[in-house]
Every structure is written in C-alpha cells, then in structure tokens.
Image: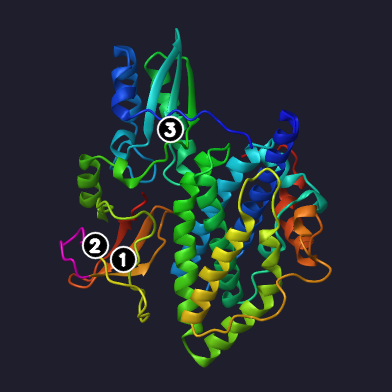
C-alpha cells in the first residue's frame, strides 16, 4: 500500500469517527430545553460539548470543519445509524448513549495505545468518554431496576436500538484494531450493565437485512435528513454570516 | 497505519530550555485569568504548556484544553494575544495542543487553594486508576463508596452528588449534608 493510500484511509477513518461525534452531539443538543430535570439537561449538554470538541479535532484532520459540518449532503456523511436515531423518550437516549459510549470508549482506548494520528485525541477523549459511559450506566441501572414503567420503557428502548449496534464493528480501513476483540469486549460490557439493570439482552439481529454497515457508506435512515436540515439551515441561509 | 512523531517534554525540561524572554512572556501569558474561573490564572490551572519565540516580535504559545470541547479556550487564546500585544509582541500565535493531555493534577497547589476559596471543591490528587470516580447517585445501590469530597464552605466530608455534570464540563454538582449548601466539584480527570 502506498503512502497516499494510507493517507486516504486515515482521512476516511477520521471522517467516520468525526461524523459519529458530530451527529450524536447534535442529537444530544436537541434535549436542551426538554430534559426531564435541569441537572440532566446540563449533563446531556456537557456530553454533547465533549463530542463536539472531538468532532472538531477529527474533522480538522479531513478539511475545513465548518464546511464539512454545514455544507455536505446527507450522502457524504459517514456516521453510524445508531447516532442519528431520534432521541425518543429519555430511555431511548440513555440506551443509545450506553451502546455508543461503550463502543467509543473501547475504540478510543485502543487508539490511545496505537501511536497514530488519532493517538493524542484518543488519549484525551477516552477520559471524557469514561464519564459518558458511567452516566449512561448509572441511568440504565436506575431506569431498568426502577419502577415497572421505567423498566418497560428502558427495555423497549434497548430492543428498538439493538438492530443498529452491529454496524459499529464493521472494520474501518485505516484503523489497525482487532474488531472481533472490540465486539467481544463491547458485548461483555453492555450485557453486563443490562443484566445488572434487570433488563433482558435482546435476542434479535444486530443489523437489519437491508442496512448492514450502510451509515459508513453514506446511506442513512430517514430521520437523519430532517436532523441535517435543522443543523445546516442557518449556515446555508446566511453564507459567511458572523456576529 | 500512519504514525506521528510524538515528543513529550516534561515541564522541567521545557522550562530549562527557555530563554529569559520566553520565561517573561510565559509569566505574562500565564497571568491571564481563566474566563470561566476568574479566581485562577492560566498558570495555576496548568493549561499553559510553552511559550516559544520564533523570531523578532513573533511568539507561539502552546495551550492545552481542559476538555476537548472546552469553549473557553478561544477566549483564553484571545486574552493571551491581547496581553502579549500590550507588551510589545505584534505577532502571537496560540496553538492548542492535546499531547500530553491536561489532567487535573496539573492544577497547582495555589490553584487548588483558590478553587476552594472560590467555593469549588478542588479535584482530589490521589494516584488511583484513571477514569470517573464512581459515587452513589440517589437511591442506586450499585456504586462502591470512595473517599469523600469535602464541602468547600464548611469542610464537612458529608456531601452527596446531585449531578455528575455541572455548570461546565469540568465540574460536578454536589451538596453538603452538613451546611446544606450546594457546591461545584472540579472532577478528577487523569
């Protein structure tokens, strides 16, 4: 493989990881003004801010961060389907956080030790993500092992999002990671938390028949277009505006 | 896989290589107050990594964000530029550096004292494993107990976590069970 091929792969990986962080950051930001309690609103906004910071570093490895965030079409985004899913009720947001934070934590832990262009960011971000994962775990335990209502909702959320979790382990060229080992560790972490929360680990498939790995190829689920419209419309309506 | 050359210099090494001018510029840049915690300056917060003179009137400042997404870094950069301009350096570049990563252990003892005085419980400086410090959240019974955070107002160690995220990404919100005052706790990040 030539140096140029390697550079192309690294850039593609940076775009995928950057888009994951950017899109989830935007979804979490949608809770502002709507969270169940003020403390939780602040927590979700802080997690969103961490993710936005990570996205900025990653997208800057690819090109101009603003152009990439605001001027790309849906088909050019390389994020996972999981992170673009609508917030749903609070349980859905927490289930999404649990699945993604567990994945991101394991992935960045590996990148932090790999000595690549991603190492400085991963070393820093993995500590932030540890807090995100802890936040999701605590809430999964509270809701899963809480009232009948919260248990039912948390179970429904995990069941609904399960089919988006397989895509995370599709290898990203440019990252030298043992993806099977990552998947095994993720499964152990997540099923451990679900079990402790008295929830049932879903038995359904982790990918839809039609959707396997599609987010990484630029094919997205329907809600993503609407999210992108909201995220981009101000920038596109007023090109070059500043205040 | 693409590799990068990572140079990790200790603070002592960096300081010994400084010229007197760089040391003076570093002192000036470090005297800028943190925009979100004005009681502390950037030296006390430990975010100022290095000051290099690149030529006559040209200076580069290395700044390490507390959190990757910390929005204060842009204000810090602007404030550093301003103070160095005022002291006769026309060309100032502030460069964010992620490596080596900032940790709460970089906050100086004086910085910790000022945090407490400002009503914020400083981060604990034990040498335990990295990552979040699990603390009990209301009625959950799963998290193990760890050394307590002391109330910055009355000193009581009887405090509880209200939220693991607070007014900024680097803080958690706690409440003192003795004096009933809520307070911010600068979370450990190592």
Q: What is the quadrant of residue B21 in the picture?
A: top left
Q: Any mark on residue B149, and which?
A: 2
Of all chains, the one bearing label 1 is B
> How far apart are labels 1 and 3 at the CA level?
29 Å
Q: What is the quadrant of residue A181 in the picture?
A: bottom right
Q: What is the quadrant of residue B114 in the picture?
A: top left
Q: Are marks 1 and 2 in contact (CB under 8 Å)?
A: yes
Q: Are marks 1 and 2 on the same chain?
A: yes
N-term mark: 1 or 3: 3
Q: Which residues are magenta?
A: B147-158
Give percent across and percent down for residue A98.
55, 68
> How far apart are labels 1 and 2 at the CA level?
9 Å
N-term mark: 2 or 3: 3
Of all chains, the one bearing label 2 is B
The answer to whether B47 appears left or right of A166 in the picture is: left
Query: Residue drawn 53% across and 86% down?
Result: A150
Q: How is the image coloured?
A: rainbow
Q: Which residue is mark 1?
A: B174
Callout 3: SS = strand
Location of the N terminus of chain B (image quadrant): top right
Instruction: State the residue in front, B39 or B107.
Output: B107
**Circle nearer the viewer, 1 or 2:** 2
Q: Which residue is mark 3?
A: B63
Query: Residue drawn 33% across and 68% down?
Result: B135
Callout 2: SS = loop
Give percent across and percent down for residue B41.
31, 36
Q: Are marks 1 and 3 on the same chain?
A: yes
Q: Is residue B70 visible?
A: no
Of all chains, the one bearing label 3 is B
Residue A29, above or below A177: below
> How far apart are labels 2 and 3 at the CA level?
29 Å
């Amino acid at each position: 493989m030539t140096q140029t091929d390697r550079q192309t792969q690294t850039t593609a990986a940076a775009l995928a990881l950057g888009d994951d962080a950017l899109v989830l950051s935007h979804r979490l930001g949608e809770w502002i003004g709507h969270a169940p309690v003020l403390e939780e609103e602040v927590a979700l906004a802080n997690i969103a801010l961490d993710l936005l910071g990570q996205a900025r570093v990653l997208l800057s490895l690819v090109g101009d961060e603003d152009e990439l965030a605001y001027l790309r079409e849906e088909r050019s985004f390389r994020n996972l389907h999981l992170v673009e899913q609508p917030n749903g009720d609070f349980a859905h947001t927490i289930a999404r956080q649990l699945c993604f934070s567990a994945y991101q934590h394991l992935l960045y832990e590996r990148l932090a030790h790999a000595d690549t262009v991603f190492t400085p960011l991963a070393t820093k971000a993995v500590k932030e993500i540890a807090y995100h994962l802890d936040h999701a775990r605590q809430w999964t335990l509270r809701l899963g092992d809480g009232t009948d209502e919260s248990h039912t909702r948390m179970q429904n959320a995990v069941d609904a999002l399960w089919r988006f979790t397989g895509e995370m382990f599709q290898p990203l060229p440019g990252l030298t990671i043992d993806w099977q080992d990552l998947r095994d560790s993720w499964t152990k972490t997540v099923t451990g938390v679900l079990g402790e929360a008295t929830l049932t680990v879903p038995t359904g498939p982790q990918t839809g028949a039609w959707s396997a790995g599609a987010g990484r190829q630029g094919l997205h689920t329907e809600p993503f277009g609407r999210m992108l419209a909201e995220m981009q419309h101000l920038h596109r309506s007023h090109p070059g505006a500043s205040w | 896989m693409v590799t990068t050359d990572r140079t990790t210099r200790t603070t002592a090494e960096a300081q010994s290589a400084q010229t007197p001018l760089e040391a003076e510029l570093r002192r000036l840049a470090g005297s800028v107050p943190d925009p979100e915690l004005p009681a502390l300056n950037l030296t006390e917060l430990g975010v100022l990594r290095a000051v290099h003179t690149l030529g006559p009137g040209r200076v580069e400042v290395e700044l390490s964000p507390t959190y990757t997404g910390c929005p204060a870094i842009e204000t810090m950069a602007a404030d550093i530029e301003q103070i160095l301009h005022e002291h006769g350096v026309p060309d100032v570049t502030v460069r964010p550096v992620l490596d080596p990563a900032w940790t709460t252990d970089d906050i100086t003892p004086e910085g910790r004292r000022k945090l407490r005085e400002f009503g914020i419980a400083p981060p604990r400086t034990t040498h335990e494993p990295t990552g979040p410090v699990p603390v009990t959240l209301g009625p959950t019974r799963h998290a193990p107990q760890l050394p307590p955070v002391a109330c910055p107002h009355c000193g009581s160690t009887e405090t509880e976590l209200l939220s693991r995220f607070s007014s900024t990404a680097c803080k958690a919100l706690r409440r003192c069970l003795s004096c009933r005052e809520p307070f911010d706790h600068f979370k450990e990040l190592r």
